[in-house]
Amino acid sequence: MHKPTIQDVARRAGVGVGTVSRVLNNHAAVRASTRESVLGAISELNYTPNPHARRIAGGKSYTISVLLPVVTTEFYVRLLDGLEHAFQEARYDVAIFPLLDRSRLERYLGSHTLAYQADGLVMATYNLTQLFQSGLGLSGTGVRPYGGPSVLVDAYAEGVDCAYMDNLLGGRLAGQYATQLTRFQGGGHLYAVWVETELDHLFTTRVFSERRSGFLEAITATGARVSGEYVSSFDSLNARTVAAQLLDEATLPATVFASADLLAGALLDEAQARGLVVGEQLKVIGFDDQPWAQGRGLSTLHQPVEAMGYEAAQLLLSRLSGHEGPPRARRFEPRLIVRASTGG
């Protein structure tokens, strides 16, 4: 049997080759019924497009570049799952470029790196659009590195498409719940652990600062106070060190809001090592609702991370299909999940 071709798909669906091409490229100018017929023919014939031929014929790379801080944390694994799901549906490949240090960021602010030989660009958590728009490198010189369609995910900015979490609301929800625990459920003194927000002191993310602002706003509104605040890098070893310091200095019983589940997990580990009764002597609230959180009984703020990534990808794909409207923002809300770590 010969390998099915795009002509075979067109004959099976009763359309022209150009229509099949538009469906493969997720073009908006295709009727729903026609798209369904073409997709049905693709499935029946088990047709797989030749990516090399697509690139030659369309003058496109059919690749999306994703710039993100790291690739090893659970949050970014989940975010990439959502992004890749949408891009694979549209038959785009994904190239990942982690922003690990100053030299790598400097390289990405140049105009000739592989990251910008893509049809679209996703920036996760950190907003580089101002640096891009100014056309300036870290030294204050250079040219605009990327002029194609881009989208922010896990971040908000005016003037660019973005899909983001309402972290200010999440912080408020955590603060309201923490106050309830300390006042009415024997939660004792209140503490918080924050994530460092700077990447090599080059640019910042508002994610964790907004969680802190919302949390303190809710605490202040009730007349409560925070007995101690701690800061940890987004690293499991440092998180455990900070957890030990907090428990060394805390007055028990205590309630702790950890602004990321990674930090909350370190607190649970340290409490277990010390023989503390979590949910009574120590109440812990996290933020993220990572896949392991339910199994460990962690009360936390749930984020629909995969859905946020998927929506960001759809915003970018619509630009690639010809959408020219004003910038769009898609806002997602976290919700509180109460479990055993707070006595739930």
Image: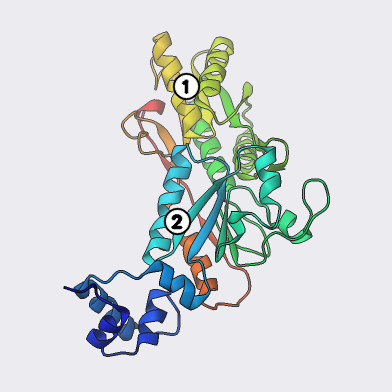
* Count of all numbered marks drawn on residues in the image: 2
Q: Residues within 10 Å of mark 1 (few under 14, many from 20)?
A: many
Indicate the position of residue 237 as horizontal and vertical percent values. 51, 21
Indicate the position of residue 282 as horizontal and vertical percent values. 45, 19
Q: Is residue 49 shown above or below 87?
A: below
Residue 164 visible in image: no
Measuring 57% from the left and 19% from the top, which residue is drawn there?
242
Give the left or right position of residue 223, taking residue 291 as reference: right
Measuring 62% from the left and 69% from the top, which residue is drawn there?
327
> In this figure, which residue is indicated by the disc labeled 2?
83
In the picture, residue 325 is in which quadrant? bottom right
Q: Viewer-nearest of labels 2 and 1?
A: 2
> In this figure, which residue is indicated by the disc labeled 1?
267
Q: Callout 2: helix, strand or loop?
A: helix
Indicate the position of residue 249 as horizontal and vertical percent values. 59, 11
- Of all residues, the one furthest to the right in this rendering is 140
Measuring 61% from the left and 59% from the top, which residue is drawn there?
116
Q: Earlier in the sequence, mark 2 or mark 1?
A: 2
Q: Callout 1: helix, strand or loop?
A: helix
User: Which corner quadrant holds the C terminus?
Assistant: top left
Q: Nearer the viewer, residue 15 or 269?
A: 15
Give the left or right position of residue 116, taking residue 203 as reference: left
User: Which corner quadrant holds the N terminus?
Assistant: bottom left
Residue 319 visible in image: yes
Indicate the position of residue 100 as horizontal and vertical percent values. 60, 38
Q: Is residue 241 shown above or below 128?
A: above
Measuring 61% from the left and 34% from the top, which residue is drawn there?
219
In the picture, residue 144 is in which quadrant? bottom right
Q: Nearer the viewer, residue 149 or 125?
A: 149
